[in-house]
Structure formats: structure tokens, C-alpha cells
Amino acid sequence: MTVTARVKHSGGRNTDGRRSAPRRTDRGQVAIEYLGFLPLLLLVALLAIQVGLAAYTTAQAGTAARAAARTASKDFPTGNAHTAARDAMSKWLAEDGFSYDESEGTGDVTVTIKIEVPNVVPGMKGKWGKAERSSTMPRG
């Protein structure tokens, strides 16, 4: 003999016969909160990328300044110091242009490189300024 249990639907009533309060479900609430928070999260991520890009651009300006100063300080340079600076940095940074300034002191050469920091945050074009680095090498 097989015994099956049947559960009778109470129709929204408690065990004492009173009607129970309707069940409130929070289904989808987390998704809505996440959608509201998503633009802020994306903006913070873009700003973090922008800060990293500014640091990278500054490092590239330093590398270019050292390479140019090294070339310009030689008595018989094998190439142009401006070209050495361009070749020492990432091509995509050099394509947008950079400013090159060379000054000679008594027995040394100082090269200053300025590179416009690229932008990844929409609507902030040109707001990040320029990365500037200088390097001084003795004439040799």
C-alpha cells in the first residue's frame, strides 16, 4: 500500500484560520541597486586607468629626456637628440607630439621633455596637462 501525503493549500490563511499578510519579495532589488551603482563604478575605474596613464606618460618623458641628454652630451653624436627622444618613448605617445627643449650649461647639457597626457575619461579632453621631465648629462 502506497501512502501519499497531500498538502492542502490554505489560501493564505494561518493555522488558526486568520488571513496571513501577503508575502513581500525582494527579487530584483539587488540588480536594480547594482544598475544604479554601475555608472559610479565605471567612473572610478576610468579615473584609475587615467591616473595610471598619467604615471606611464611621466615615466616615458623621463626615459626620453635621458636618451636625448645622453645623445646631446656626446662630443661626436651618432644621431639627433630630438630623434633619440622620440625613439626612446612609446610610438603612440610620440605621434601626438611632444615638446623638446635643450639648454647647455658650463660642461653639461639639460634636456626637458613635455608630453601631453592622453585622455580616457569622456568629456575631459585636455584637462590632464603635460608630463614634464628633465635630464642633465655632462659633456663628454
Image (cartoon, rainbow, N blue to C red):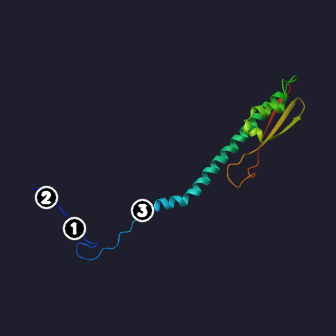
For image coordinates 16% across by 59% down, the residue present is 4
Name which residue type carries label 1.
Answer: Lys
Q: Observer-nearest residue: 110 or 2?
A: 2
Instruction: Provide the residue designation for mark 2.
Output: 3
- Along the viewing direction, whichever of 27 and 51 lies nearer the viewer: 27
Which picture quadrant has residue 86? Answer: top right
Q: Where is residue 54 in the image (x, y as percent from the top left)?
A: 70, 45
Residue 20: horizontal and vertical position, in percent?
30, 74
Residue located 76% across and 49% down the image: 129
In the picture, measured across the screen, residue 102 lies left or right of residue 61, that is right
Most foreground residue, 136 or 9: 9
Seen as rendered, the residue at the extreme bottom is 18
Q: Which residue lies furthest to the front in this view?
A: 1
**Which residue is denoted by mark 3 in the rendering?**
27
Q: Is residue 129 above or below residue 67?
A: below
Disc 1 crowd, CA 10 A, few/some/many (<14, 14-19, 20+)? few
Across and down, in percent, residue 73 comes to 85, 28
Q: In the shown orientation, is residue 103 left or right of residue 19?
A: right
- Which badge, 2 or 3, comes first in the chain's sequence? 2
Tell me the residue that label 1 is attached to.
Answer: 8
Q: Which amino acid does label 2 sit on?
A: Val
